[in-house]
Amino acid sequence: MIGLSGCHRGQARLDDASIRVTPTLASAHPHVGTDTLAIQLRGANGPPLNDARISVETEMNHPGMVPSNSTATGTAPGEYRAPVEFTMAGDYVIELHIRLADGRTLHRTTDIRGVDAKPEAN
């Protein structure tokens, strides 16, 4: 798994300190094709946040490319999974649109650098 460092574009509708969003790709070296994004949601003091709705938009970081969209599914308390599609080699942006069970919303953006054309040989 590869941990993702995120940059935040624009203002989140929640105080950044109140919600911890941790996205992680399953592949250590992302490549063209489908990967899995794990998303962990935690409250300010660490409790898992359940019943969130998370939409995921994956697109290359340059104009003119069509994004792919998916919806995350809850897999455990505060844990979600979503497929992400990398259509060609290059750099990508993954946008998370999150609606918590209480109706509050937030947005997180994460950069993915250096998606390879094919999987790394073992």
Image: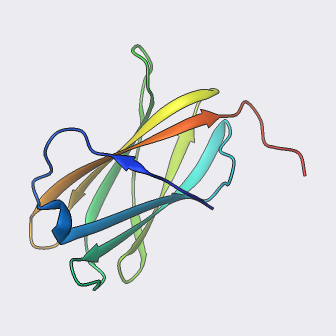
Q: Quadrant of the N terminus?
A: bottom right
Farthest residue, direction top? 64
* 22 left or right, relative to 14: right
Residue 79 appears in the rendering? yes
Residue 100 appears in the rendering? no
- Residue found 61% across the figure and 59% down from its top: 26
- Residue found 51% across the figure and 46% down from its top: 84
* 5 left or right, relative to 34: left
Farthest residue, direction right? 122
Is residue 29 or residue 71 the one in the foreground?
29
* 27 left or right, relative to 3: right
In the displayed structure, 103 sits above or below 78; it is above
In the displayed structure, 78 sits above or below 110; it is below
Q: Position of residue 91 (x, y in %)?
A: 53, 30
* 20 left or right, relative to 114: left
In the displayed structure, 64 sits above or below 66; it is above
Q: Position of residue 76 (x, y in %)?
A: 43, 82
Q: Give residue 54's quadrant in the image.
A: bottom left
